[in-house]
Structures are given as C-alpha cells and as structure tokens.
Amino acid sequence: MRTITYWIVACMAAVTLAACGAPASNAPANKSSSAVNSNSNTAKPVAAAPTKDVLMAIEKSGWEAWKTRDAKWTEDNYSDKGFNLGSTGRTDKAAMIKAMTTVKCDVKSYSLSDDKMQMAGPDVAILTFKGAQDATCDGKKSPANVWSASVYVREGDKWKAAFYAEDPNAAPAKPAAGAAAKKDESKPATAANKDGAKPAAAPTSDPATDALMAVETKAWEAWKNKDPKGLDDFAAKDLIALSSTEGWTDRAATLKRWSDPSCDIKSFKLTDGASVAYNSDYAMLTFKSTVDGKCGNESVPAEWGATLYGKENGVWKAIMAMGLPAS
C-alpha cells in the first residue's frame, strides 16, 4: 500500500480590486487624493501560470543550492508552510535551513529525468521526476536512485516549494538521449531530511487533520477489504500515485495496483497525522502507516505517507499519493 499515501495542493484566485469612488460633485478633482486612490487600488503582481520548464528550473536551482550548501535558496524559495517528508517524518523550513550549515555533504554529481508537471489547481502544481545521485552526507552514502515529488504553490509573484519527498527504491534510470539533469541528493528542502535534520515534533490533533485522516482511513479499509468502489471513491479524476517498481502511475493503473488480489491484510494503523491547508479546497496530509499483512510473499513495511487532497463537488479526493520507508 506504499502508493496509497501522498502529494496536494492549493487553489487561489487572483482578484483585481475595483476602486470605489466618492459620489460625483462639481468640485475640482483633488489630484493628490486621486493619486493616493490610484496607488491603493493598484493590483499586486501575481505569478503567471507555470510551465514544466519554469518549475524544473526552480527545482534544479534548489538541488544546486543544496550541493553548494546555500541556505538562502530555501529561505527565498520555500513557502513558510513548506516541509519535507523523509524516513523519520516531517522536517519544517527552519530545520532545513539549519541542516544546510550543520551537516556536511559531498555531492559529486546529480541528474533529474522523467520529469512531469500536473496542475492540482490554479495555484498548486505537482512535479514528479526520477533522480540519480552520487552523494555522501555525514559519512552516509545517499541512495543512488530515487523517485521524487515536489509540490509548488503560487504565493504572490512567485511559485514556491511547499513539499518534497522521495522514495529511495527507484531502479537505475534507462539511458535516454537529452534526459533532463537529475538531482544529486535532494534540494535544500529535501536535503534537510537526507542531511539528518531532526524531524518536527509530533503534531497535535486538529479538526482539519482529523477529517482528512478519516477519509484516508476509509480508503485503507477499502484496500484491506478489496473494495474497488471504496478505492474509486477515494481517487480524484486525475490521481497520480507512486509505485517503487513502476514509478508514477495514472488513476487507472493505480486503482488496478491497489486492488492486487495477492494482498492479504489482517490489520493496519495510521498514526502521526498532520496536514497543511493551502486554501479551503486543497490540503496535504502526512501520516505513518503500519500494516500486519503481506502482498504476495512480502510483508508490507512501515511507511510515511503523503496524500495531496482536493475537493471535487465539495468532497475530498486524493490527487497525489506516495509512501516512503519509515526508519
């Protein structure tokens, strides 16, 4: 069920405010007052809708900043709501920045390939890609190949990183002409977990998180009970999810995988739920899963999961889901 967890995001509309003038009069216009009104009604700049190339350029600059230990990239390009998810849980922005100066990393090379972009909403975008890297942090070798996901949100005139996670179980990339550069280990935000930054304190329960955890739990029950309708109800129309063996898969392939008849699940438990709302219609949920059961001949491992939720006709649906091994 590694893939039944995951990535999110927010939907905001840029609104240009209309000036409300005073009733007309025969008095001459006050130029000073008019200037003030004009300035006060000037719309704030709003970032244009992104392209994959634009977001990948930001992503690559983040990886390069991680390589050179430049914490300013995270300060300037990560949302204050942003966090990473790693084998020990969530890492917030402050911990990422601190790790850039306290953890020693030697990154020899990195590249990003198989990159795709999907808009979750007008102000939320998902980047998925495969990473290959040759890096060592504090004496520990980083995984050579990872499946990665980054979520970006529009904040004023910039697109900022809001989430990053990676599964270290990706197979080596197949040679491909013109493949986009892949990231070394992880960008500053991502690297915080790889760098060994301490995870955030266990979150306290709140109504928004409880509501999303209820939706998530219902989906896991459907998986356990081999209930295809329950899984179908959980999935957004454009769902993508991560498989360690297949990479990122679309809705049809994901639902087929989640309905694997070889899985024999006795019980499961979802804990450590935490969520971040990007607005009233988009939110990211993270949690830890433990399962008593097998798929085929393999026991289902404990994982940290992330699900990006969006509302369809007022109902929370999973837009992106992923899981990564928990330590």
Image (cartoon, grey):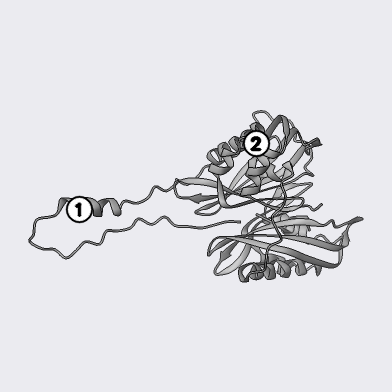
Dot 1 corresponds to which residue? 34
Q: Is 85 placed above or below 104 here?
A: below
Q: What is the number of the mark on residue 66?
A: 2
Quarter of the image for the N terminus: give it. Answer: bottom right
Horizontal and vertical percent position of residue 291: 84, 63
Q: Which of the 4 quarters of the picture holds residue 70?
A: top right
Most distant residue in the left direction: 26
Q: In this view, does 231 lie above or below 257?
A: below
Q: Position of residue 108 (x, y in %)?
A: 72, 28
Residue at (48, 45) in percent of width and height: 158
The secondary structure type at the circle numbered 2 is helix
Which residue is at a point 67% across and 62% down the rendered structure image? 274
Q: Distance between the residues labelled 2 and 1?
A: 48 Å
Give the answer, above or below, for where 259 lies relative to 36. below
Q: Which of 316 and 62 is in front in this view?
A: 62
* Quadrant assignment, res 48: top left
Q: Is residue 163 visible?
A: no
Say what amino acid the circle numbered 1 marks. Ser
Quadrant position of residue 254 = bottom right
Of the residues shown, which amino acid type is indicated by label 2? Trp
Residue 209 shown left or right of residue 75 in the figure: right
On the question of residue 166 being in view, the answer is yes
Vertical position of residue 321 compared to residue 100: above or below: below
> Which one is earlier in the sequence, the residue at label 2 or at label 1?
1
2 and 1 marks in contact (CB < 8 Å): no
Measuring 77% from the left and 50% from the top, which residue is drawn there?
A: 87
Callout 2 crowding tier (Cα within 10 Å): few <14, some 14–19, many ≥20: many
SS at badge 1: helix
Packing grade of label 1 (10 A; few <14, some 14-19, many >=20) is few
